[in-house]
Image (spheres, helix red, strand yellow):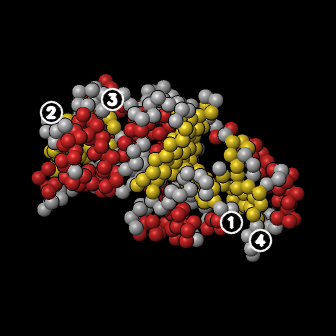
């Protein structure tokens, strides 16, 4: 029997216990022996529940107990999660975490300690919740050169954008709905500003390149400026708008960014709606593969943590070579990557056709009924080139008291 400790008995931590109980036999078979929770570290006591007798408030009880072989970290945030995880690894304990902030910020150091101590630091649940994505990267796709990872990596923003798309909701209304349903936090900044997606794509990029990625170098744009009017155009064009994290390898350079992306119905991520996540991984031999499922939530995320528990239980005496080294992966300027761009402009197209064509050449134009504005979609071009042309257009528009209302990257 392997003794386990859970640090943080919130949504995910209690989910881990539920998965361990519900699938006890399956897990014992998979791990080769039973997994038993010896301690649960939390600030609360949970009187009258099963966990009451296992609760400890002092981390040292876990860290000093040689019987505890695997520790689950489901506290979230950087501190004390970082200090506790580091101490556990240094004490020769395996760690499984769902904490993407921790992995993105301290993954390099924690992976190195795990290697040195011949234990495992595993984080399947940190990206895509219950979707298998970390393990496919280090196992099934280990013989591939990864060329691209593009994903809808945040359930909350995908729920909000789906509401705007399918029900014509405003951003504010959809956000309130997401909060009422418990998807969005009271302070939704990490989700809606794209920070959560940024950390996740940083982890995936590091997994793909084998080098450390500084998430602060990834240009990140959230969804707060996306409006219901944008979705009216998207609908007219047969497209949708998704918050996407993307990393591409081109000519030896790695481009990574987080931004709303307009995608057509033929794009594999088009049908990924509500709180679901979808991740495309393109390898140089296998081509495009896709991973889909519940990117958040108690049991899906807990299931991924428990899978890491089993993985550690099967490798109690060895370090599974996963992750990345301390070598830095440079992130190339997103300005050099080529995309199409969706642009909304005030005024009528008829009077401004020559300005659009002078700046961008022939473009697909969309005009909606009873709107004193129009939109156009450029051909593929480098973002730097697009921004130069946009400046030309803006100067012309200003002379006519008109302006650019919106710009969204398009596939
Ligand atoms: N806030 C995250 C999301 C939770 O909405 O996807 C899972 O990481």
What residue is disc 2 on? 66
Query: Tag 4's secondary structure?
Result: loop
Ranked by sequence position, the earlier of labels 3 and 4 is: 3
Q: Residue at x 73, y 44 (%)?
A: 381
Count of numbered circles on the image: 4
Query: Tag 1's secondary structure?
Result: helix
Ranked by sequence position, the earlier of labels 4 and 1 is: 1
Ranked by sequence position, the earlier of labels 3 and 2 is: 2
> Residue 408's x, y, as percent?
66, 55
The reply to whether residue 307 is visible in this rendering is yes
* Number of the front mark, 3 or 4: 3
What residue is disc 3 on? 320
Q: Residue 372 — which label?
A: 4
Report whether 242 appears left or right of 237: left
Quarter of the picture containing the N terminus is top left
Answer yes or no: disc 1 within 8 Å of ligand 1: no
Query: Tag 3's secondary structure?
Result: loop
Marks 3/2 in contact by CB < 8 Å: the verdict is no
Disc 1 packing (10 Å; few <14; some 14–19; many ≥20):
few
Ranked by sequence position, the earlier of labels 1 and 3 is: 1
> Residue 93's x, y, as percent?
23, 33
State the separation of the CA atoms marked 2 and 4: 71 Å
Pick out the residue farthest to the bottom.
Answer: 370
State the separation of the CA atoms marked 4 and 1: 16 Å
Q: Residue at x 55, y 38 (%)?
A: 287
Is 292 above or below relative to 4? below
Quarter assignment of residue 105: top left
Disc 2 packing (10 Å; few <14; some 14–19; many ≥20):
few
* Number of the front mark, 1 or 2: 1
Disc 3 packing (10 Å; few <14; some 14–19; many ≥20):
some
Query: Tag 2's secondary structure?
Result: loop
What residue is disc 1 on? 236
């Amino acid at each position: 029997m392997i003794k386990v400790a859970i640090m943080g008995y919130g949504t995910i931590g209690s989910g881990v216990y539920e998965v361990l109980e519900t699938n006890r036999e399956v897990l014992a078979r998979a791990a080769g022996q039973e997994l038993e929770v010896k301690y649960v570290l939390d600030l609360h006591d949970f009187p009258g529940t099963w966990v009451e007798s296992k609760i400890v408030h002092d981390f040292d009880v876990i860290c000093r107990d040689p019987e505890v072989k695997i520790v689950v970290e489901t506290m979230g945030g950087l501190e004390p999660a970082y200090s506790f995880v580091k101490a556990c690894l240094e004490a020769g304990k395996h760690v499984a975490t769902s904490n993407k902030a921790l992995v993105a910020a301290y993954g390099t150091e924690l992976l190195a300690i795990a290697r040195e101590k011949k234990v495992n630091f595993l984080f399947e649940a940190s990206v895509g919740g219950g979707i298998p994505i970390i393990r496919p990267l280090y196992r099934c796709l280990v013989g591939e050169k990864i060329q691209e990872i593009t994903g809808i990596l945040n359930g909350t923003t995908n729920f909000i954008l789906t509401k705007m798309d399918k029900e014509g909701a405003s951003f504010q209304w959809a956000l309130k709905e997401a909060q009422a349903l418990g998807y969005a936090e009271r302070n939704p900044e990490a989700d809606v500003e794209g920070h959560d997606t940024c950390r996740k794509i940083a982890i995936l990029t590091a997994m793909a390149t084998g080098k450390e990625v500084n998430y602060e170098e990834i240009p990140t744009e959230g969804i707060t400026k996306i409006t219901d009017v944008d979705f009216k155009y998207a609908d007219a064009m047969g497209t949708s708008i998704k918050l996407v994290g993307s990393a591409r390898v081109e000519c030896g350079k790695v481009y990574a960014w987080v931004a709303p992306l307009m995608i057509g119905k033929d794009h594999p991520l088009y049908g990924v709606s509500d709180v679901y996540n979808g991740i495309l991984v393109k390898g140089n031999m296998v081509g495009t593969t896709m991973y889909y499922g519940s990117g958040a939530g108690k049991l899906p995320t807990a299931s991924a943590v428990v899978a890491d528990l089993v993985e550690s239980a099967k490798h109690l005496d060895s370090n599974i070579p996963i992750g990345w080294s301390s070598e830095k992966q440079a992130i190339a300027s997103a300005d050099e990557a080529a995309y199409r761009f969706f642009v909304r402009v005030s005024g009528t197209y008829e009077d401004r056709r020559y300005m659009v064509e002078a700046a961008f050449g022939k473009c697909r134009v969309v005009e909606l009924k009873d709107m004193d504005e129009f939109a156009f979609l450029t051909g593929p071009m480098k973002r730097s080139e697009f921004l130069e042309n946009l400046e030309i257009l803006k100067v012309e528009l200003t002379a006519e008291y008109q302006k650019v209302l919106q710009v969204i990257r398009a596939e």
